[in-house]
Each structure stands twice: as C-alpha cells, then as structure tokens.
Amino acid sequence: MNNAFLKSYQTLAEVYGKGAFSSITLNKTLAFCKSQDKALITKIVYGVLDNDIKLEYIISHYVNKMPKGDVLIFLKIGVYCLTELSIPFYAVVNDTAELSKLSGDRYVVGFVNATLKKISASVADFDDYPVDPLESLSVRYSYPLWALKKLVKDYGAQTAEQIVRFRAEHGQTVRFVNKVDVEAVEKQLGCKAQITPFNDAFIVQGGNATQSAYYTAQSLSSMAVARICAQKLGGTGRFLDCCSAPGGKVVYVKQLCPDIEAVARDVHPHRAELIRKYADRMKTDVSVDCQDMTVYDERLDSGFDVVLCDVPCSGFGVLDNRPDIKLFRENKDISELMKLQYAILANCSRYVKRGGYLVYSTCTVFDNENGQNIRKFLKEHDDFHYGNIRLAEFPDADGANFYQFLPHKDGVQGFFVAVLNRAE
Ligand SMILES: C[S@@+](CC[C@H](N)C(=O)[O-])C[C@H]1O[C@@H](n2cnc3c(N)ncnc32)[C@H](O)[C@@H]1O
C-alpha cells in the first residue's frame, strides 16, 4: 500500500471523524514518517481539507448517493490527487482503491475504483459550477458560503474574492532568540531558509523548531502582536497576557523586555500548563496561573502597564495552518465568540494602569469579532481612547489605531490588532 496515502488517510480520519486540529494531528503523523513521504502527506492532508467543499461538489456529480465516513475520505484523497497533483491518473486510481481495502468491504473497493475511474476520465474539463456568483466562488475556492457573505459585507465583493482565492505558500516561521543570519539558520536547522520582515525570524522548509531554547516556531502575526506590546512597555513595567496559552506572545514579550514582570493567565488548566512548559523551554520567567478572565479580580485592578487580550476567535485568518476551521465553524459560533471576546475585553480593561495600554488581538478577518468589539468598547468606556500601533516593519499598520492584516495584501496571516490607551 502507498504509505503516503495511508498516513494521509489516517490523519484525515482523525480530523473528519474526531474533529482533531489538522496542524497538531499532522505534526504527530509526520514525526513517525520517512522523510521522503513527508512532503506528499502534508500536501494531501492540507490539500484535501482546504479543498473540501470543492471535492464534495465534484464527487456529488459522479455518484447517485453521496457516500459517508471513510468512503468519502478515500474519494476525497483520490479526487484531490487527480485534480491538484501531478500524479498519473492510473496510479491515483490504483493507490486509492488499494487504500479502500482498509474498509474490509469488497463493495467499497469496487465503488471507489469505479467512481475514480469515471472521475479521472472527465474531471480535467469539469466546469459545472453553480450559476450564482457567490455560490460558485464558495465552491471553487472551498470557502463556506456564510463566511464568504460576511467577507462581502465587511470588505466588498472584490476584496472578498481576493481573500478567498489566496493560498499562502507552506513553510514554517522560526524565531531565533539570538542574532543570526540566513547562513547560520540553514546550518543550524539543516534546511533552506528565507528572511522575513522581522530580523529575528526566518521561513524554513522542513527542520524541527520545537525542542530548542534558542529558536522556536512562531508565526509573524503572533510576533507582530508581541512586538506591539513590547514597544508600549518600553523595556520596563508589568505586562498581563489575559488569554495566554500556549504562551507564544507572552514568552516573546518577556524575551524582548527581560526586565518586565510578565504575568500569564488562561482559563484551562491543561493550557496553562503549556505556557509553563514553553516558558521553561525558552528559559524565561513568566508567572502563570489558571483564571477565568471574564470574572473581575480586584488583586489585578489597575496593576499593569500593558494588558493584552488575545481573545479566542473563529480563526479565519489562519486557514493556511488550520484549514479544518472551514469544516467545523458555523455562523452561529460567531455571536457566541463575540460575547466571550467582549466579556474578556471589558473585564480586563480594568487591569490597565491609568495611562497604560490595552491591546486587543484576534487571528480572524471578520469585523464582528474585531472592529465591532472595539467600537462598542470605546462607546461604553470613556476612560479609553485609541492609541497607536508602532511596527516599523509593516508601514501600513505603523501609526494606525487598529489594523486588519490580510494574507493576500500583507503576506502574513489574517489577524487584527487594536491599541487602546487608558486616560491618566
Ligand atoms: C488565541 S488563544 C491565545 C494564544 C496565545 N496568546 C499565544 O500567543 O500563544 C486564546 C486563549 O484564550 C483562552 N481562553 C478562553 N476563554 C478564556 C477566559 N474566559 N479566560 C482566560 N482565557 C480564556 C483559551 O484557552 C486560549 O488558550
């Protein structure tokens, strides 16, 4: 059996069947794979999830009754490889039929084989997309219709199309604690590296950045938010990260400003533990506790120069890393998330010292979770006004009160950040 197909199927079954996070599940799979299979497994797993709506749509045109469960996963792997990868058709059909033997059902094997043969004969010319322009865009770029409608409302049709069309190149961003150049990075990680707008971060293909104290995997968007907080701290004072796990931002802020007191909170005990482990690994001193940050705690009142609310969100800005978000999120989740985000923001604003800063961030692109929360907050809190983002490496954001990063425009994940200042 083709090992890359087998491992891809096993990973996808975890995501589709159990709702597992794609990035975490894939990393676990890759840890036990031969290096020659890793690139193909990554392509198939991310590709199938990213193209899920389109693949189901194509399959539905070739079957009388839509299959479910594992049979549908076998077909999605096959159709993805037929339509997006340059593997000979006969090999895709054979390897997928072989894979479907895992079902232990001869009928399933025959069905998968026959369906893929039929699809491979005409899929190159497939153009039977919905007539409605938005529905067509939703299928072609596998972006849920409800989410696409939100983008059109927030950004207009043209930008919405650019957002859903764009696909980022896959690669990992690795941040180094000490000053290094590309040659040193390539030598240390044993793979090709590329510079980024931040002089301490590099994009690498391959390598493992999860074990060292000297470098770590961290996205540019996460780094940008941490740098904005560090700039407001100016090297001293007290910093509170209210939604801190797994600790990416608080650890970086502490490394940028070693003399500050860094305090991290998260509502889930197992996630608070992740912050402790990460801070230990990076040899930084962060005070970690488990706490629900929607509930007022007078011990924290007016105690911090900078408070970061990096709130839980729908995650539609990080689809490159988590394409499974498109499968499981629903429109109704957004209003629940907005309530939680606002509750955290409103409560934690009380922990900002007079004259201090409140930084709000998400990794999503919907105005409901971003600008709308900030506008409501400022309306209801007249002791706060807008402050300025300072981020020289991103001139469009530098000097703004808030900024929505978009992957197709800014070359980083889609995240939002706003800086608010508490009156003296
Ligand atoms: C976007 S993640 C934070 C990422 C983190 N700032 C980093 O850079 O690694 C949001 C976090 O908020 C936490 N969270 C959710 N509800 C919370 C609450 N009521 N109080 C505190 N933390 C909460 C979640 O457990 C999750 O770890």
Image: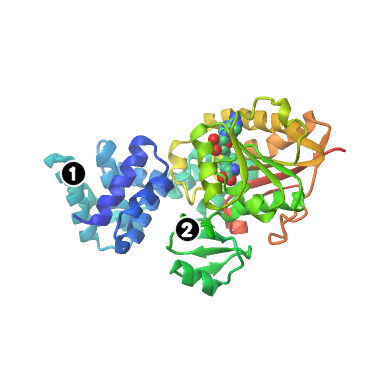
- The 10 Å Cα crowd at callout 2, few under 14, some 14 to 19, many 20 or more, is some
**Residue drawn at x 22%, y 47% as measured from the top left:** 115
- The 10 Å Cα crowd at callout 1, few under 14, some 14 to 19, many 20 or more, is few
Q: Quadrant of residue 272?
A: top right
Pick the residue in front: 101 or 113. Answer: 101
Q: Earlier in the sequence, mark 1 or mark 2?
A: 1
x and y, in percent, of residue 316 in the image? 54, 43
Point out the residue furthest to the bottom here. Answer: 183
Above or below, 415 relative to 177? above
Image side of residue 390 versus residue 247, left or right: right
**Residue drawn at x 69%, y 33% as measured from the top left:** 345
x and y, in percent, of residue 155 in the image? 64, 46
Image side of residue 56 versus residue 268, left or right: left
**Label annotation for residue 142:** none
Image quadrant occupied by the C terminus: top right
Looking at mark 1, is its residue's CB closer than 8 Å to ligand 1? no
Pick the residue in front: 267 or 363. Answer: 267
Say which residue label 2 marks.
Answer: 209
Amino acid type, mark 2: Ala
The number of discs equals: 2
| Helix, strand or loop at mark 1 | helix
Q: How far apart, in angstroms, are the residues tagged by discs 1 and 2?
A: 34 Å
Amino acid type, mark 1: Leu
x and y, in percent, of residue 242 in the image? 64, 37
Say which residue label 1 marks.
Answer: 102
